[in-house]
Image: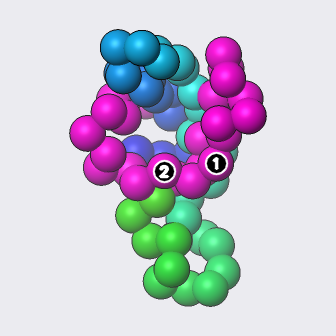
Amino acid sequence: MKIGDLVKWSHPQAVDYGLVLEMGEDRLPKGYWDGHVLIQWHRKPEHSGFYPAEHELLELVSESC
């Protein structure tokens, strides 16, 4: 996953699409956010934030160029 990727939250009762805005590795303190991505959600923007990139409900829909 990388900045600009379109992702889907695939929980059956809370499907949403979002955009990866930031990689956790780029954030301080170093090491703390590794493996996480900052996602801006479309339907529920209040749920935006850092999520584990390998979360079982997070799917890559489209890679950015």
Can residue 26 be seen in the rendering of this structure? yes
**Three-letter amino acid code at the position of disc 1:** Gly
Figure quadrant of the N terminus: top left
Residue lying at the far left of the rendered structure: 56
Residue 49 numbered tag: 1
Span highlighted in magenta in the image: 37-65
Q: Which of 6 and 48 is in front in this view?
A: 48
The spot of residue 46 in percent (x, y) is 73, 34
**Three-letter amino acid code at the position of disc 2:** Tyr
Q: Which residue is drawn at 40% across and 54% down?
A: 52
The spot of residue 33 in percent (x, y) is 51, 71
Q: In this rendering, is residue 4 above or below 25? A: above
Residue 4 lies left or right of residue 58; in this view the side is right
Q: Residue at x 66, y 16 (%)?
A: 43
Residue 27 numbered tag: none
Q: Is residue 30 covered in magenta?
A: no
Q: Name the residue under label 2.
A: 51
Mark 2 and mark 1 residues within 8 Å of each other at the beta carbon: yes
The spot of residue 36 in percent (x, y) is 46, 59
Q: Is residue 43 covered in magenta?
A: yes
- Say which element carries label 1: strand
- Say which element carries label 2: strand
Q: Which residue is drawn at 60% across and 41% down?
A: 39
